[in-house]
Image: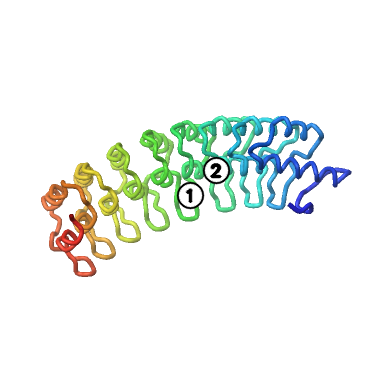
Amino acid sequence: MASSGFVTQSSNPTIQHEMEKKLMDLMADKNSNLNEIEALISRGVNINCTDREGLTPLLQLVKLGQARNDLLDVIRLLLDQNGIDVNCKDSDEWNALYYLCRLYQKADLIDIILLLIQRGIKVDWTNKSRQNAFLFLCQHYPHKNMIDIVQIFIDNNIDIGCTNSNGWNALHHLCRNYKQSNLVDVFRLLVEHGMDITCNTRVGWNALHILCHEKTQDNHMDLIKLFINLGIDVNSKNKGGWNALHILCQNYQKDNLIDIVRLFINHGVDVNCSDDDERNVLHILCGRYTEENLVDLVQLLIDHGIDVNSKNGGGWNALHFLCRNYK
């Protein structure tokens, strides 16, 4: 990195710059030694030096050093230094909490977050895109202690309803990305603290739409039932005219689909709802579903008044789709 890229605060800029560059290199190297880092700091290096991107050693560490086995120890070492700016931000206004929630994938993330909070990091900070660390956590973190980290953020007054530029909130991200069996408990916790389950993305997708598109867990029905019991509109459409039932039948390929479809019907879903191409759920089922109980699903929809002669925009009815796709 060019020498003009570092901000120095020393009567001997050359020596100070060499020390700062060395510290930044150590922060980026997952194999660097903790003792070597400590020795360099003891020589008086500027712990808040910055590079061209506005990265300090702390930010460099959490951005590029996620593979370290001793990440918590190195962060603690930096935070123990007098004058360390725990709320430092880069040129995009990302702080250490942002980088950790976006990039760090190990279960001890909770310990690092607690340490940063204890040292005064601003939990509710938003970057230039108006996103907070909570959004990144729900989009990327894979471990079952997610619920404990969510509780920590709630206890520290983070805005759980924050949305990104596409209108996605934490609930949308969780429905798409979180694969653990305790997702239903995370949902309940967020709703208890005011999460808006009816929030739509810019293209009209609510959390139920995304859940029906992404999830194939054993407790899929429990997750859908929770949303329905919380009052989500089962007939809400996205900008393509698809409701949750369309999306579910397009993507779900397990034989208990019939139980979920029955759940939607019992809670008032419009089985004759058509998308922008005039396809109803029967068209989609006959074109996509491959399980042997398709006949039972079709009978269920017929019993609840679906129009078997309905045609899509291309003139196809359910029988056309069935003859093309069902093997």
Q: Residue 103 carries which label?
A: 2
Please state which amino acid type lies under the numbered disc 1: Thr
Number of labelled discs? 2
Residue at the image position 50 percent from the left and 44 percent from the top: 135
Tell me the quadrant of the picture where the C terminus can be found.
bottom left
Q: In this view, does 138 lie to the left or right of 60?
A: left
Q: Is residue 296 left or right of residue 57?
A: left
As drawn, the residue found furthest toward the right would be 11
Query: Helix, strand, or loop for circle 2?
Result: helix
Crowding at label 2, few (<14), some or many (≥20) Cα neighbours within 10 Å? some
Residue at the image position 16 percent from the left and 47 percent from the top: 292
Say if 45 sits above or below 73 in the image: below
Residue at the image position 46 percent from the left and 31 percent from the top: 145
Q: Which mark is residue 131?
A: none
Query: Helix, strand, or loop for circle 1?
Result: loop
Say if 176 sits above or below 315 in the image: above
Please state which amino acid type lies under the numbered disc 2: Leu
Q: Nearer the viewer, residue 162 or 248?
A: 248
User: In x, y percent, where is residue 157?
Assistant: 53, 36
Q: In this view, does 130 lie to the left or right of 89?
A: left
- Residue 98 can be seen, yes or no: yes
Q: Earlier in the sequence, mark 1 or mark 2?
A: 2
User: In x, y percent, where is residue 17?
Assistant: 81, 45
Q: Nearer the viewer, mark 1 or mark 2?
A: 2
Crowding at label 1, few (<14), some or many (≥20) Cα neighbours within 10 Å? many
User: In x, y percent, where is residue 75?
Assistant: 65, 33
Name the residue tied to disc 1.
163
Q: In this view, does 300 lie to the left or right of 111?
A: left
Q: Nearer the viewer, residue 174 or 16?
A: 16
